[in-house]
Image: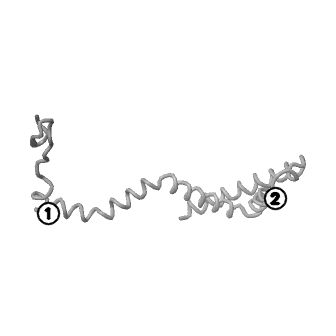
Amino acid sequence: SKEAQKARSEAAKLVRQSSSSVLGAMKEGEIDIMLPVSLVSLIVRSSTDGEWAIDVLCKWLLITTAILFRSLILQFVWGVFLMPFSMLWFFCPLRLFVGGGQKMVGNNDGKKKANGKM
C-alpha cells in the first residue's frame, strides 16, 4: 500500500539522518576507535541505506515476536487444524457411548463404589 511505503521511506530518511549525525559525533569525539568494527560498519551502512536498516529491524522484530509468542501461535494453528475433527466428534452419535461410563473408585474397606461417593 502507498501509506506503508510512505511510512517506510520516512522512517528510512530519519534513520539516515540520525545515523549520519551519530557518525559525525563519533568522529568528533574519536569514539569510533573504541567501538567494535561491526557496530561502526552497521552505522555506516544505515547512514547510506536507511531502507535496509528498517527492513532488518522489522525482520528482527517479527522473529522476536514469533519466538516470544510461539506457544500461542502453535496452539492457534493446532486448534485450527483440529477444528474439523472436533466438530465431527461433537455431532457424532458414537460419543454418547464412549467415555461416559462411571469411574470405579476403591475405598479403605476394599469395596468399590461408583463416582467416588462413600
Looking at the rendered structure, the kind of residue marked 2 is Val
Name the residue beneath numbered marker 2: 37
Query: Label 2 to label 1, Cα distance in Å?
Result: 66 Å
- What residue is drawn where x is 59% and y is 61%? 59
Is residue 53 left or right of 101 when viewed as pictured?
A: right
Outermost residue to the front:
110
Secondary structure category for the residue under label 2 = helix
| 49 to the left or right of 56 | right
- In-front residue for pair 37/108: 108
Q: Quadrant of the C terminus?
A: top left
Image point (19%, 62%), residue name = 89
Disc 1 residue type?
Cys
Report if the CB atoms under discs 2 and 1 are less than 8 Å apart: no
**SS at mark 1?**
loop
Q: Which of the two residues, 62 or 70, is positioned nearer the viewer here?
A: 70
The one of 93 and 3 positioned closer to us in this rendering? 93
For image coordinates 29% across by 63% down, the residue present is 82
Q: Residue at x 63, y 57 (%)?
A: 57
Q: Which corner quadrant of the image does residue 61 belong to?
A: bottom right
Residue 92: numbered disc: 1
Q: Could you tell me residue 47's position as x and y percent?
A: 77, 59
Residue 26 lies, with reference to residue 49, above or below; the image says above
